[in-house]
Amino acid sequence: MSHQLIRSLLFKFDAEFSHDLTLKALSLSNKIGLLSFLKPPNPCKLRTVMGIPFQNPVGLAAGLDKNANHIDALGKLGFGFIEVGTITPRPQIGNPKPRLFRLPEVQGIINRFGFNNVGLETAVENIRLSKYKGVLGINIGKNFDTPIEKAGDDYLLCMKKVYQYANYIAINISSPNTKNLRDLQETKALNILLAQLKEEQTRLADYYGRYVPIALKISPDLTDKHLDTISKSIIKNRIDGVIATNTTISRESVSDLFNGKEVGGMSGKPLFKLSNSIIRELYERLQGEVPIIGVGGIFSGEDALEKINAGAELVQIYSGLVYQGRKLVLDACQSIG
Ligand SMILES: Cc1cc2nc3c(=O)[nH]c(=O)nc-3n(C[C@H](O)[C@H](O)[C@H](O)COP(=O)(O)O)c2cc1C
């Protein structure tokens, strides 16, 4: 069945229901061997980013597999890397439903999930049980009820537990759906957090005899001044990579649409230009010292290439996969080469 047909059926149901159903169907298809018939992407140039060799520069962005339940199946779709999470120390149910909304007119999505996840212990167990051998990023965050002054404790706890299973660890301080989370992007708080994470990373690298890079995931709703201070803090604290960007709270050009005024983070096509401009600005400030993983609104091979031209070394996809299916992964991979 074509992706368009499946999509038009799924789009008749509630967005979160369809999302869960699709992931379950994917894992079932994998269990019965159907995904083994999928055509792999054409070979790409091998690149090393953050010290990790990537066979293919197109990754799955965080949030699709929050609980690391579907890694094996997602690993068959042709991605060069998969990022699971956001995982928080304790399980939490997230915001009340409905909390996921489609904007089909502009191929956008608004979500206000609020880090619903099974918590660190169960997620790590899921990762441990997976058979996936590719590059795995583990995205970590804080519980909604941890006071922001204590956020560092949550990140450190998550980092300690996921370290030995991750190829890289993504630090999510940019979701708009956890109250005050984005305050961690402010200079003083960010410097404290990044210094704590660096210290813990050094200790863990010693303990396990393996260096696992850290990538900071930032918001697209940042001013030039914010970008100045964030870039300085990233360089100063020797953070290994930046993921740009998370979803936006801006509603430019969508506020008149059905669902356009829903509260939450918007992703998909309406985010493309904004995230590209952040990547460009960031690239100028980081001067090639810290690699950028570009994410936001990729819907074609050309879009993926535009992110690379803006300064990204790798890209990630989420909303485009929902609207276009896995062909997008192959197209993006082919265009970047
Ligand atoms: C439904 C949904 C849930 C998401 N959950 C997370 C999350 O838990 N952690 C995170 O870092 N990003 C999360 N994101 C953001 C994506 O990883 C990505 O940064 C953003 O959607 C932009 O990419 P896209 O336009 O390709 O979707 C989520 C996005 C969507 C659409």
Image (tube, helix red, strand yellow):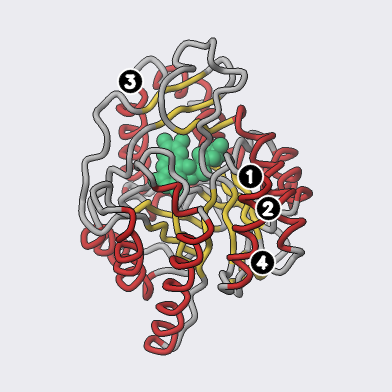
Q: Amino acid at mark 3?
A: Asp
- Element under label 1? helix
Q: Residue at x 42, y 30 (%)?
A: 264
191 sits to left or right of 66: right
For mark 3, what is the residue? 14
165 sits to left or right of 54: left
Q: Residue at x 61, y 75 (%)?
A: 51
Tag 3 or tag 1, which sits nearer the N-term? 3
For mark 1, what is the residue? 330
Residue 246: image location, x then y, percent:
52, 44
Front disc: 1 or 2: 1
Cα distance in 3D space between marks 1 and 2: 7 Å
Residue at mark 3: C-beta within 8 A of ligand 1: no
- Element under label 3? loop
- Element under label 4? loop
Front disc: 1 or 4: 4
The image quarter containing residue 301 is: top right
For mark 4, what is the residue? 290
Tag 3 or tag 4, which sits nearer the N-term? 3
Q: Amino acid at mark 2?
A: Asn
The image quarter containing residue 304 is: top right
Tag 2 or tag 1, which sits nearer the N-term? 2
Front disc: 2 or 4: 4
Residue most extreme to the front: 188
For mark 2, what is the residue? 42
Q: How many numbered discs, if any? A: 4
Residue at mark 1: C-beta within 8 A of ligand 1: no
Q: Tag 3: Cα neighbours inside 10 Å, few (<14), some, or many (≥20)?
A: few
